Image (cartoon, rainbow, N blue to C red):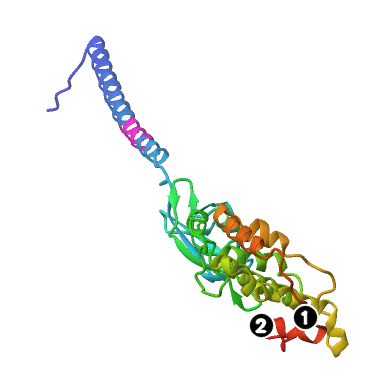
Amino acid sequence: MKKILLLSPNKGKRMKTTQNIIKLLLATTLVFALSACGSKSKTEDTNITVEENTTTIPTVTLKSLMLTVDKISLNKEENTTVKVEATYTDNTTKDVTQEVEWISDKQDAVSVQNHTLTAKKDGNVTVQAKVGATLSNKINLNITWIVDGHVLPPEPDPTVNNATLLGIDVNDNGVRDDVERWIYEEYKDKHPIYIDIAMQASRGYKLILETPERAKEIHNEVRKARHCKYYYMYSAKYFNEPILIKRDFSTKYLRKKLYYNTQERKDAYTQYDTLLSGGSYTLPSHNERKSACDFNTSKY
């Protein structure tokens, strides 16, 4: 026999309301759960984005400079190629030759334009490149001065050179080094015989410093350079030889201002000149003048 449960209308209504409340609670719980997941996911995504934005690129800085020179032995006024290569902290390299500051222990000895170094003065010279506070390696250059195959002696220290009567003559050719350098600079663009005659004249001036008291004995030797000069100015044409000196040149400056440039040297010359007073001296003939040259004239 079936039993029939009869609910009162109010009780049925209460049950339905209870069910609706349970459904609402379940739905609310689900929404909160989903919100929490979404917030977490959004937070994680945000964190990742922030981490990507704060990533920095390492700073690249100059690490070293390398200076290279094609030639380290140069003649005066000769050029050579230079290059300065920069290496950076990321191991990349770059040619910075035109951006560097040049440093030398003798600033007037070399000049650098772009990739070309020019030797301006003879001697041993050190060069180095600089960018900011970074220095390159040092290069030692040996600069010589050669004129017509002749290597000039280095410029002497004036104090040391003028401290003695004869001065400094490192190549021992009978001509003081400062005088020799002046002669080659003065006459380098003229016919080579100008240099030969000026050098001979200087060797004669040395005789005066050494023995001024023998003035009359050494007079002819001292004057030989002048006789040689006149041969190649006037006499050569009579012997079918070329006139090599088209215009007279005087060694007066060489003698008075350069060779006898200290009081001791001037006094020696004054003694020599005074002792010649009252003497009688014969000039050589045309055919004798050439023999007065003390250098090899066959090359001319």
Q: Is 122 on the left or on the right of 289, as rendered?
A: left
Dot 2, crowdedness within 10 Å: few (<14), some or many (≥20)? some
Task: Say which of 131 and 262 sits in front.
Answer: 262
> Is residue 40 in the magenta section?
yes
Lateral position of residue 92 relative to residue 218, left or right: left
In this rendering, the answer to whether 36 lies above or below 90 is above
Q: Quadrant of residue 43?
A: top left
- Percent coordinates x, y for residue 58 in the rendering: 40, 47
Residue 269 x/y as whole percent: 62, 60
Q: Is residue 281 visible?
A: yes
Q: Residue furthest top?
A: 10
Mark 2 vs mark 1: in front: 1
Residue in view at x 78 percent, y 77 percent: 283
The image's mark for residue 284 is: 1
For the residues bearing labels 2 and 1, Cβ distance under 8 angstroms? no
Per the rendered image, the range of residues in magenta is 37-46
Q: Amino acid at mark 1?
A: Pro
Q: Residue visible at 27% across and 15% down?
A: 17
**Amino acid under disc 2:** Phe
- Residue closer to the observer: 275 or 292: 275
Check disc 1 and report its element: helix, strand or loop.
loop
170 relative to 163, above or below: below
Image coordinates for residue 149, horizontal then vertical, percent? 62, 79
Taking the view exactly as shown, the residue that stands out farthest to the front is 278
